[in-house]
Image (cartoon, rainbow, N blue to C red):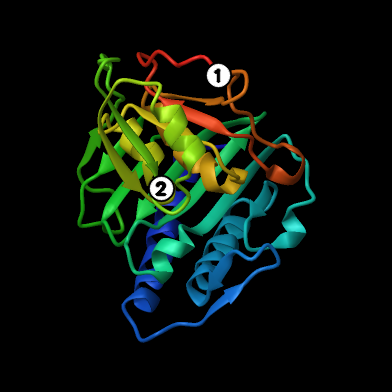
Amino acid sequence: MQFDELIAVMRRLALEAGDRIMQIYDGPDFEVRAKSDDSPVTEADEAADALISAGLRAAFPDVALVTEEQADTHGQRPRSFLIVDPLDGTKEFVQRRGDFTVNIAYVQDGTPVRGIVYAPARKRLFYTLADGRSVEEIGPFGDRPGEVRPIGVNATPDNRALMVVASKSHRDQATDDYIAQYGVRDMTSAGSSLKFCLVATGEADLYPRLGRTMEWDTAAGDAVLRGAGGQVVRFDDHATLGYGKAGFENPFFIAYAPGVLLHPLG
C-alpha cells in the first residue's frame, strides 16, 4: 500500500461524502428506515457509502473492502483491508445533533494503521499522515490539504482528576459504574468516533465503551488515536483491540491516554 496515495484518496472521499451528507442534513425531512438489526439508516448513509465505495474500489481494486452498508462484504476474513462507516452516528444525524462522522480506515494484519475521521457538521477533520502520525486539519477544507496541526494525547493525565468522554446515545449504568471507579474532573458526551478524537487531541483522557460496536465504528478513530500516542484495549483483559475478527464485531473496550492507570476489572 502506498500510504501517500491512500491518505490523499481517503481525505478526498471523506470530504465529498461529508458534503453529500450535509446536503441531506440541511434539506427537508429525510426518510429513516430500520435495518435488520433495528439500527436506523437514511439516504445519507447510502449516498455516502456509494460515493466512498466507488472511489476506493477505483483507486485500490486489489484491496478488500468492508463497509457497514454492504452486507455482502461482511463475510470476508482478509488480512489487510479498507473498512468504512460512511455515516457513523446515524442517531445523531437523525436528531440533528451534529456529532456524526465519516470514517475510513486501512487495517493491516489486524491493526488499523491509517484512518480519517471527518465530522462535517462540526467542521473537524482528523487523519493520519503517510508516516502514521495524526493531525487535525484546520478548515476551510479544499482540494489540497490546508493548515494541519499535530495532535497528541495528554502526556501527563492527573489520575485524581481525569477528563472522561462517554457515548451520547449509548450511555448506560454499567458505563457509569465503571467510570465511578476513577477520579474524574469532568465528563463530556459525544457521538460517533469523535470520542476517539477527543482522546487523541488531549481534550479527554479516557473513553470506556461497554456496549456493542462493530469494527467499522472504531477502526478510523482507533487509527487516529494510535497515531496520536493513545491506546485501545479490550475491556476484559486489557489486550490491544484487534481487527479482522469473524463478523467484525468488537468486544467492550477502553480507549485512553497511556498515562491513565486503568482500573482493575470488576
Q: Mark 2 points at which residue?
A: 117
Disc 2 crowd rating (10 Å Cα; few below 14, some 14-19, many 20+) is many
Q: Mark 1 points at which residue?
A: 265
Q: Which residue is found at the position 39% from the left and 40% from the top?
A: 166
Q: Nearer the viewer, residue 163 or 68?
A: 163
Q: Position of residue 132 (x, y in %)?
A: 43, 28
| Quadrant the C terminus occupies | top right
Q: Which residue is found at the position 41% from the left and 25% from the top?
A: 256
Q: In this view, does 124 lie to the left or right of 9?
A: left
Please, is residue 170 above or below residue 156 in the view?
below
Q: Distance between the residues labelled 1 and 2?
A: 30 Å
Residue furthest bottom in the image: 28
Q: Can residue 75 be seen from the camera position used here?
A: yes
Q: Which residue is found at the position 40% from the left and 85% from the top?
A: 29
Q: Position of residue 252 (x, y in %)?
A: 59, 34
Disc 1 crowd rating (10 Å Cα; few below 14, some 14-19, many 20+) is few
Q: In this view, does 85 lie to the left or right of 139?
A: right
Which mark is first along the chain, 2 or 1? 2
Identify the secondary structure beneath mark 1.
loop
Corner quadrant of residue 93: bottom left
Q: Which residue is found at the position 78% from the left and 47% from the top?
A: 76
Discs 1/2, front: 1
